[in-house]
Image (cartoon, rainbow, N blue to C red):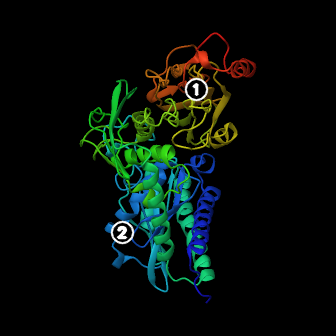
Amino acid sequence: MIAAPAGDLALQVMWNRLISVVEEQALSLVRTAFSTSVREAGDLSAGVFDAQGRMMAQAVTGTPGHVNTMAAAVDHFIDAIGTDHMHPGDVYLTNDPWKGTGHLHDITVVTPVFRADRLIGYFGSTAHVVDIGGRGFGPDAGEIYEEGLFIPIMKLVERGRLNRDLIALIRANVREPDQVVGDVHSLAACNDTGIERLADMLDELGLDTVEPIASFIFGRTSAATRAAIARVPPGTYRNTMSVDGYNETITLAVELEAGEGWIHADFAGTSPVSSHGINVPIAYSRAYMTYGLLCALAPGTPNNAASLAPFTVSAPAGCILNARPPAPVSVRHVIGHFVTDLCLGALAEVLADVVPAEGSGALWNFQAGARAVSGAGLGRDRPPAEVLMFNSGGTGARPRRDGLSATAFPSGVRTMSVEATEQVGPIVVWRKELRPDSGGDGAYRGGLGQVIELGPAEGYELHFSAMFDRVENPARGRRGGGDGAPGRVRMDDGSPFDAKGKQLVPAGRRLTFELPGGGGWGDPALRSPELARDDLAQGYVTGSGP
């Protein structure tokens, strides 16, 4: 075995190599996953942890809601399983919203890493599965018990032996058993990929542990993050935001306290928990608070336990950003994604050259259960299908350039293609295009939303679960910029369609979404004539307004 290299340069090379290891781990998940949310949208996370459960590196592929919550989840696995009961060949999993990533539809898998029978770390991964039983993916449940199968932290594999009873239990409780079980195996397999690549790396470097690399990573990252936080003068900063909620406008409030190398967010003043599944566990709230502030203050700093540590949160028990069991949390992203703009808005005055206008925030996801219509002549060989699609509105304009159109911020997931969506089930997307005039006016224009028209394939109807926001409360402009256009949902005859909840799209009918745009930044009178002419030439604006 070769001698272990020493020195900062060698350790930096090892750090970069470790990032490539977790990126290959994530790509393995993408290539083997069954669900379109993973394969097409990248709704996943992958990371490597030291023996103490501290995240050393994450894959570039993934979302903040998965990565930043999974960073805390491994501690829960260590507490629940106990290192004395961990063995080579083990694999653990859970979808506990309060110990994982915030709702039952995300399954987190953790695999311990042994070297010479010594536990040296963990690989973790998370993915959104197409179905978990219960009411299905949507906001209609009144308690967590209605939302699907709740799997506590437990062993999926023990010493190489698959827990077939658990697999059978999962298969019996979900609508798409092949997809869900396939994704579980994909999660375990991608961790195995990480373990193999880490072993190759340690063999090559002559190391039996990741401790020297971890110490270097955490030391460098901590110093860089705390130095970046120094851009914010010590003090207290506040912001509030109104969003749609479930047929009742809710208030999100934050008080940021900045100190020497740390920032704390207190969500006191935020509306209480909802009776519907739009509530947010606090780990998810922290994930998007931390992500937003790191984007503003330290965008070049790698994401790991040390970069997350200076950011802390608190909230009154029972507020919508600190939901406790058994509150329903199925679509926690609808409210949780607004935490980024909420916290950035609190720092808008002291970071005037960085903070954008508000964006559309929450994804316009939908889940549709396609069912053959009685008498349609399709026969009994046409089983029902679950179709999940992610769509994005516009981001807020930035201090020096326009917002991004049809882009998911802060989640970072990719929009699913029409072709991939239609391949999964009997659904037809008739139109998908940018929505003119939807970005807020300003010296820099807000990003545009989309117009999407879809419906069931011939002989089918859709039991459609809507989970949309920014219909009643559009994204606000900043520094004189105009608000983005609010979203709208309607049937083909013009009749309104509720923005949240399960509804029927009958056979032969179509549904049209008009996704919200981002707010503008700066006085519209200061927009350059060249940019204004380009807007008209590209069809981004029509001159007639929203």
Residue 78 numbered mark, or none: 2
**Mark closest to the chain's N terminus, 1 or 2:** 2
Closer-to-camera residue (199/465): 199
Tell me the element at label 2. Answer: helix
- The residue located at (42%, 53%) in the rendering is 69
Is residue 286 positioned above or below 432 on the image? below
The image shows residue 180, relative to residue 277, as above or below, that is below
- Say above or below: 14 vs 390: below
Report the side of 8 relative to 467 (left or right): right
Instruction: Say what amino acid the circle numbered 1 marks.
Output: Gly
- In-front residue for pair 235/24: 235
Q: Residue at label 1? A: 446
Camera sees residue 267: yes
Mark 1 → mark 2, Cα distance in angstroms: 45 Å
Q: Position of residue 444 (x, y in %)?
A: 60, 25
Q: Residues within 10 Å of mark 1 (few under 14, many from 20)?
A: many
